[in-house]
Amino acid sequence: MSDVAIVGGGTAGLSAALFTAKNGLDTVVFDTDQTWMHKAHLFNYLGIGSVDGSAFMATARQQVDDFGADRHQGEEVTAIEPADDGFSITTDDGEYEATYLILATGAKRDLAEELGCELTDEGVVDVDVTMETSVENAYATGAMGRTEEWQAVISAGDGAAAALNVLTKEKGDHYHDFDVPADAEETFGGMVPEEE
């Protein structure tokens, strides 16, 4: 059983996976590669001067992999149900269980609806500031909870907010993921992992 299952491998899903995997939670990501990022070129993502969306995604995936997330590329989630200790996730390839669920499927909200997540009057998933839905320990990120503002940087922030709330529930207090230069030295010997 995983600590966290993330459905969707765009900026929201991978941002959530980065935070949870980096901080020691067993994280599984289901990524069908249907992200809008393949149609994008980023000039408006803070810290990025200019990058093709697909190149950005390749770097993001490598970063998540480097921190140990179990990414299932091309494996589509077909059903999610509440289970005794969290959630049961079904794909064409198997069944998985996780304590926490982070949905990051863009404007595709069918899995959230089937799980019983409440929607707003605008038809988006109703989330609080931590991105938690009406279903305890289930989160919806990015375009799932927004009628507009479908920007990569906003989606990444939503994913991070969901992950930090999961980490707060697991580790207590208000969990912060703040690194200093010594952390890079300890983690990577002072070097950022190479991109593939």
Image (cartoon, rainbow, N blue to C red):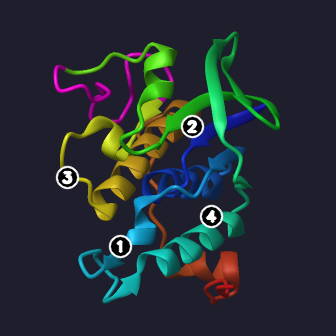
Magenta stretch holds residue 152: no
Quadrant of the image containing the C terminus: bottom right
Query: CA separation, marks 1 and 2?
Result: 36 Å
Mark number, residue 40: 1
Sequence-wise, which precedes: disc 3 or disc 2?
Answer: 3
Q: Residues within 10 Å of mark 3 (few under 14, many from 20)?
A: few
Residue 133 vertical placement versus 172 (above, below): above
Residue 91 vertical placement versus 84 (above, below): below
Q: Residue furthest right?
A: 94
Tell whether 81 sits left or right of 57. right
Sequence-wise, which precedes: disc 4 or disc 3?
Answer: 4
Foreground label between 4 and 3: 3
Q: Residue furthest top?
A: 84
Q: Residues within 10 Å of mark 1 (few under 14, many from 20)?
A: some
Q: Residues within 10 Å of mark 2 (few under 14, many from 20)?
A: few
Q: Which residue is mark 4?
A: 64
Q: Amino acid at mark 4?
A: Val
Name the secondary structure under disc 2. Answer: helix
Name the secondary structure under disc 1. Answer: loop
Query: CA separation, marks 4 and 1?
Result: 20 Å
Mark number, residue 149: 3
x then y, percent, for residue 33: 57, 58
